[in-house]
Image (tube, helix red, strand yellow):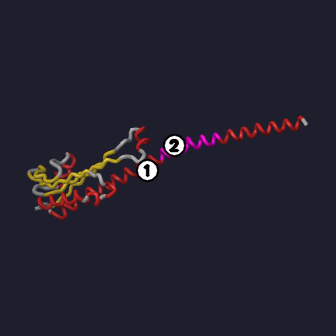
Amino acid sequence: MRRSFGLFRRSRRRHGLIRDQRGVAAIEFALISTAMFALLSGAVDVTQAITIQRDLNRFAAEVAQAIAGSCKGAASCAAAAMETIRARQGNIAPKLATIQLGIANFDRANNRIENIIGTMTYLPADMNTQALAMMANGDKGVAVLATYTHTPIILGLADDWGFTTKTFTAKSVVLAARP
């Protein structure tokens, strides 16, 4: 009879070990799921960043082409078109409703960009260089500078790693008219 009690005690110890292993699985799941969540949120933010940059590039190019194509370099028409686009930019790009838009209609004369009309008082250096490279003296052009500030979806996690916000920019310079 003593032997049977000894077997019973051993089996209780074995059940105790099995219960301990279940707790280990829960801890492993917690550690792995946290890492997987961080990777998934990072992948979502990277995908959003790529999509935002693509949409912003398209938006800037389409606005520049619309003004250049419809106004053919006429300053008064370009100013009216700029105001119309700025008033309706939330409808044009609903996912990027907070875009800051800079638009300029300009002339190239004496190897310089002059007569800038619009929301930009000057062209940034890279846009100025691009305009001078693609236009001849006497040409009229349109430049669009669009900026958008993106906030990550999971700001707390991103903030811990220093990724709070990112400003995306898109630039487009288009020939509007040639004399």
Task: Tell me what residue is drawn at x 81 percent, y 36 percent.
Answer: 9
Residue 68: image x %, image y %?
18, 61
Work out whether residue 150 or residue 178 is closer to the camera in this orientation and state it. Answer: 150
Q: Which mark is residue 35?
A: 2
Residue 107: image quadrant is bottom left
Rate crowding at label 1 as few (under 14), some (14 to 19) or many (20 or more) other CA atoms within 10 Å: some
Residue reaching furthest to the bottom: 70
Mark 2: amino acid: Ala
Quarter of the image where the N terminus is located: top right
Task: Tell me what residue is drawn at x 66 percent, y 42 percent.
Answer: 22
Magenta part, dominant SS:
helix
Rate crowding at label 2 as few (under 14), some (14 to 19) or many (20 or more) other CA atoms within 10 Å: few
Residue 90: image x %, image y %?
28, 57
Is 34 within the magenta? yes
Q: Helix or strand or loop: what does disc 1 sit on?
A: helix
Q: Which mark is residue 44?
A: 1
Comes first in the chain, label 2 or label 1: 2
Q: Helix or strand or loop: what does disc 2 sit on?
A: helix
Work out whether residue 70 or residue 89 is closer to the camera in this orientation and state it. Answer: 89
Residue 29: image x %, image y %?
58, 44
Left or right, 151 with reference to 35: left
Mark 1: amino acid: Val
Q: Is residue 39 above or below residue 142?
A: above
Residue 148: image x %, image y %?
30, 49
Q: Which mark is residue 65?
A: none
Is 93 within the magenta? no
Residue 93: image quadrant is bottom left
Which region is colored magenta? 23-39
